[in-house]
């Protein structure tokens, strides 16, 4: 890699939008992890339920609403509430990615849910940024964007159902 490519890459990382994302992501991650950990503990008190799933599910709903406001206002400078559908579609995709990664850490490496959630928050956060930048807040929306995200979501739901019915 030559020096001009390295400088271009560093310059892109220092774009104001990306810097705002990093600060906002830190806030959102801290809030989201606290919500998840609290819910994981509370649902863990209820016998015979998948506490990880329900903590992740309700934590994601609460976090999505918080994140929609912070990312929209701070990172992308767009407060248009009409974008909530696209934002929720992105978070639906990343919800299952988050769930699968936490399960992977737990099942393969015996890392508890709390630590695994903190670890996967970083890659899931970057995935959210890029999907929101190029899907939710993009000026010209392409129909194939919806189709790709919908297809990914359908595959994730099928895998989840298979895990729940066969894998456990």
Image (spheres, rainbow, N blue to C red):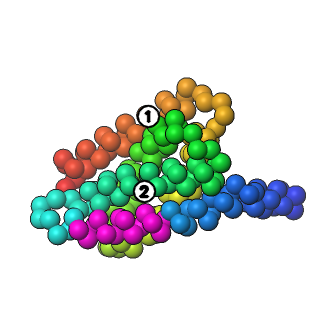
**Residue shown at 62%/65% (left/top)?**
23
Q: Quadrant of the N terminus?
A: bottom right
- Magenta range: 29-42
Q: Quadrant of residue 33?
A: bottom left
* Magenta stretch prevailing secondary structure: helix
Mark-to-mark CA distance, 1 and 2: 21 Å
Residue on which disc 1 sits: 150
Say few, some or many: other residues with alpha carbon within 10 Å of mark 1 (under 14 / 14 to 19 / 20 or more). some
Residue 130: x %, y % from top left: 60, 49
Residue 10 highlighted magenta (yes or no): no
Q: In which quadrant of the rendered image does the C terminus lie? A: bottom left
Q: Quadrant of residue 9?
A: bottom right
Q: Estimate the x, y position of residue 108 in percent, counting from the top left.
A: 34, 67
Decide which of 98, 38 is in the foreground and name it.
Answer: 38
Looking at the image, is 165 positioned above or below residue 150? Answer: below
Which one is earlier in the sequence, the residue at label 1 or at label 2?
Answer: 2
Q: Is residue 94 above or below residue 144?
A: below
Residue pictured at 69% horizontal, 62% vertical: 19
Q: Which residue is mark 2?
A: 63
**What kind of element bears circle 1?**
helix
């Amino acid at each position: 890699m030559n020096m001009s490519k390295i400088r271009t890459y560093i310059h892109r990382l220092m774009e104001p939008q990306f810097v705002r994302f990093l600060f906002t992501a830190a806030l959102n991650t801290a809030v989201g992890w606290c919500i998840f950990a609290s819910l994981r503990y509370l649902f863990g008190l209820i016998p015979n339920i998948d506490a990880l799933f329900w903590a992740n599910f309700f934590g994601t709903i609460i976090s999505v609403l918080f994140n929609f406001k912070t990312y929209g206002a701070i990172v992308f400078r767009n407060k248009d509430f009409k974008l909530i559908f696209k934002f929720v579609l992105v978070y639906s995709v990343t919800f299952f990615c988050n769930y699968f990664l936490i399960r992977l850490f737990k099942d393969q490496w015996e890392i508890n849910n709390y630590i695994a959630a903190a670890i996967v928050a970083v890659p899931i956060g970057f995935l959210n940024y890029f999907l929101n930048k190029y899907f939710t807040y993009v000026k010209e929306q392409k129909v194939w964007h919806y189709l790709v995200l919908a297809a990914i979501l359908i595959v994730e739901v099928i895998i989840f159902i298979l895990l729940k019915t066969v894998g456990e």
